[in-house]
Amino acid sequence: MFNTGLDTLFYDTPGFVRALKARGEDVFAQADDKNPNTSNRLNLGALKNPEGSLLLIDAGNAPAVRAYHSVQDFLDCPEPAARDVAITSITGVGSSALGSAALAWNVSAAFGEPVLAIVPGYGMADVVLQALGG
């Protein structure tokens, strides 16, 4: 909940969540997996999308979010959307998957193209380490 609050301060996470709900998708960012992903339920929690995960965000087409848990998963993906991506975004120090997806959503909506979001961390779990490295 704390990470979600911080993401909300820096990125338009409420707008991202509203846009997906309007499409019939439910977004949550919880550590537990009691409610597994279905076709309309998207888990953007840190345990499901850890540091180094890649999210392909497309504000104009479904599915709006495709998750890749490693660079190799992304490179091995045969989908044209993954092959043709030309824009990448990365959020600031300590941002989680929810903040990364929200920023990429805004960029995708602005440019009308899919955006590959790099998840830089676990939110507050490693913000100090990342800040020292930055």
Image (spheres, rainbow, N blue to C red):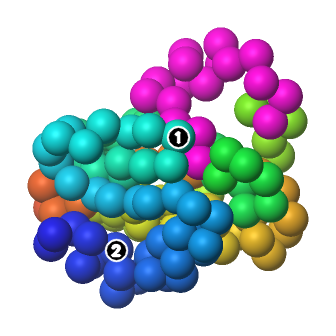
Rounded to the nearest angstrom, the CA distance separating label 1 from label 2 is 24 Å
Answer whether residue 103 is visible to the viewer in this image: no
Amino acid identity at mark 2? Asp
In the image, residue 63 lies in the stretch drawn in magenta: no
Quarter holding the N terminus is bottom left
Of mark 1 and mark 2, the one earlier in the sequence is 2
- Classify residue 94 by image quadrant: bottom left
Above or below, 26 against 109 in this view is: above
Span of residues in magenta:
65-81
Name the residue tied to disc 1. Answer: 39
Q: Nearer the viewer, mark 1 or mark 2?
A: 1
What's the residue at 16%, 63% (across, down)? 124
Q: Position of residue 19 (x, y in %)?
A: 60, 74
Q: Which mark is residue 7?
A: 2
Q: Where is residue 26 in the image (x, y as percent from the top left)?
A: 44, 60
Answer whether residue 75 is visible to the viewer in this image: yes
**Closer to us: 65 or 116:** 65
